[in-house]
Image (tube, helix red, strand yellow):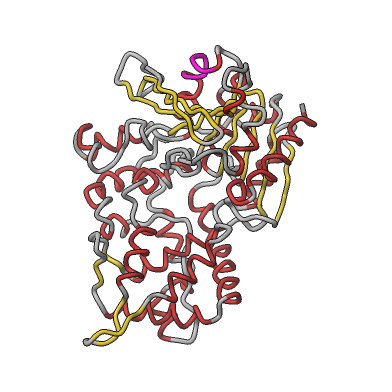
Amino acid sequence: MTVSYRQPGVVLTDRRFTVPLDHDHPEGDTIELYAREVVASGKAHQDLPWLLYLQGGPGFGADRSVGRPGWLGRALKEFRVLLLDQRGTGHSTPANRQTLPLRGGPAEQADYLTRFRADSIVRDCEAIRPLVTGGAPWTVLGQSFGGFCATSYLSLAPEGLATAVITGGLPALDAHADDVYRAAFPRVERKVAAHYARYPQDAERARRIADHLLTHDVVLPNGYRLTVEAFQSLGILLGTGDGTHRLHHLLEDAFVRTPQGFTLSDAFQEQAQGMLSYARHPLYALVHEAIYGQDGRPTAWSAERVRAEFPQFDAAKALAGDEPLLFTGESIHPWMFDCDPALRPLRDTADLLAARTDWTPLYDAARLAANKVPVVAAVYHDDMYVDTAHSLRTARTIRGLRTWITDEFEHDGVRTGGTRVLDRLLAMARDEA
């Protein structure tokens, strides 16, 4: 049963679908998908083309917005929009420490999670498309990991697409996770340098916090063990449009004086735990490196291994000298499964996923070279999350793809620049069609 309701300027409809866990074995287990249909109030009864939005991640449910902000408002001028909670996220049969034990032990959980990558998401989309559009192809808007999914869509089922719009999400087609992180750490270092140039007072603040964490055992109110490595991982903020300012505001609230001396303030701890916890998106931590697995090699905790090749990120070494403390970026490490109570029960499962070698291909270079679907992509100059050189190499591989390369926005440009970004890309797509 579908349920429709209203918010300012829009009519929303909850949609639920049942799909196979493994599309190669449709007679087996099934999972539920949830999606929210959105249409402009004045167009609720019109026959409109569909736009499918694929969220970034992996592991995040679709946007929970109110009304028609940013890119959504622009899309609703001409589309009926479907905001899909990709499998395992949001209301779509969630995968987390509470639910995964239903599958069995760590080995069974790891086997289950191999089916939560872009190829399975694309096949989900194709399974529900006839039920949503009546069989007509739809436009897909893929943000970040959603762009990875859109590229898989062009490889696996281009007949389902009228147009593909990708923002900050053109993946490397054949790079191993090691290649991704070797390119990432220098970008992160540049972002940290830019942050300290903007907020020079933060260099000493970050060193002081790191020194405190190296000499004290700090457990946040939610049970998260705040190590210096965990503190450094807050640098993930620096890849977003307002991230440098959010990090600055966090650091300036770090310490408070007490009868026992200075300690980390309750305000700092409360904010930090919200930024660090994976309770709302554990799938991100579990399959993040797996989204790069294709070539018969294990990912083997790639980011942790590659980080050792960049000793400037070692906090103890930085504090022993005069070097600035470097934050890290979008990377998952085994210690996160020790620090975060939302992840601790899943450590063995994560280890098994990191050891797997049987990952299936996600992209078809030959099919992409023969592509006939109009494709446009925003590539953000020096994007901290997705390597620009990797994206541009892929862009040259996909026949007919048009890129818009810009330094006006960071990785979340479709959120911060919403209407302008989508308006530009849709105009490019119309020209391409």
Left or right of 218: which side holds 134? Answer: right
Residue located at (59% from left, 24% from top): 50
Residue occupying the point 59% across, 52% down: 411
Please say whether residue 234 is one of the residues in the magenta stretch.
Answer: no
Give the magenta-colored segment's residue range: 128-132
Foreground residue among 329 and 419: 419
Looking at the picture, how far across and down is residue 248, in whole percent? Answer: 49, 71
Please identify the quarter of the rendering in which residue 136 is found. Answer: top right
The residue sitting at the right extreme is 431
Residue 130 is covered by the magenta coloring: yes
Magenta-highlighted stretch: main secondary structure? helix
Where's residue 297, x and y in %?
Answer: 43, 43
Determine the image quadrant of residue 64: top left
Residue 414 percent across, percent down from the top left: 61, 46
Task: Using the image as rendered, state which of residue 378 and residue 424 is in the foreground.
Answer: 424
Q: Residue at position x 69%, y 33% from top? A: 375
Q: Quadrant of the C terminus?
A: top right
**Where 257 falls versus 144 (above or below)?**
below
Q: Is residue 120 left or right of residue 194?
A: left
- In the figure, residue 349 lies in which quadrant? top left
Is 184 placed above or below 177 here? below
**Foreground residue, 10 or 270?**
10
The N terminus sits in image quarter? top left
**Residue 354 visible in rendering:** no
